[in-house]
Image (tube, helix red, strand yellow):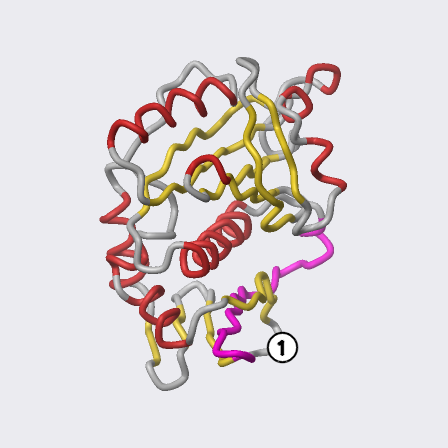
Amino acid sequence: MASEDRVLVDTVVKADPDTVWKAVREPDAVHRWFGWDDEGLAAEIEHMFVEQPEGDDDARTVAWPDGDVIDLEPADDGATRVRLTRRAHEDPDAAIGVYDPIDEGWITFVQQLRFSLEHHPGADRRTVSVTGVDLGPEDDALLARLGLRELGEQPVGSGYTLSRADGSTFTGEIYFQTDLQIGLTVAEEGNALLVIARIPPAAAPPNGTATFVLSTYGLDDEHFAALQDRWSTWWDVEAEAPAG
């Protein structure tokens, strides 16, 4: 790794290197973790993971023209260390505290990759998602109303229980957490992964916005339709969540 690179994500995935390599090189496998369902996802995957990067099968690295690199290394107990690096900012001091959407996107996607391989290997994914949700003013913050703000003080691996306005609850554990993101497993939806990613007010005035992505596996059409209704109501937006 060059000295000018930034290590953005460095995590261990409980899957062997061959499996993880296929997951970042084969479009059908990438579809199980990258982004979220919309009409352009297949084309985006083809462009981003087939047309753009150079893959080195021997070194197990994928390198993009802009300097982004994923590299894999064997880890203990048959697992794989996944590291994603990006080029350093031209002015590191000026970049402190500045929102970087590509950084945040990669953080989400690597965690979705880890979850897919660790909890639903080989299974196809369907997502419910919404973007651009107003976080609201400090005295009526959306994340506080949803019960998410208090989870920010809990360590990864902690259990949680959250309630919806209709009285139903859902449970799981904190799967990952960064300054602007939290990932929650959701037991009641067949062990799904809910990622909430914030854009701060400075980058999305006046209050900031949030993206919610719920990745599900193994649900039939009836159960998935009901899930869409539950979650779009919970995050309190007047929008139809896109489905895959």
| Left or right of residue 30, residue 238 in this image | right
Provide the secondary structure element on which disc 1 rests. loop
User: What is the x, y in percent for residue 114?
Assistant: 47, 59
For disc 1, the marked residue is 3
The residue under the point 33% across, 52% down is 32
106 falls in the magenta region: no
Q: Residues within 10 Å of mark 1 (few under 14, many from 20)?
A: few
In this view, 201 is above or below 108: above
User: What is the x, y in percent for residue 244?
Assistant: 27, 37
84 falls in the magenta region: yes
Tell me the kind of residue under disc 1.
Ser
| Left or right of residue 214, residue 242 in this image | left
Comparing 151 with 180, the one in front is: 151
Residues in magenta? 75-96
User: What is the x, y in percent for residue 137?
Assistant: 69, 17
User: What is the x, y in percent for residue 195?
Assistant: 52, 41
In this view, 198 is above or below 233: below
The residue under the point 46% across, 52% down is 112
The residue under the point 60% across, 67% down is 7
The residue under the point 56% across, 28% down is 209
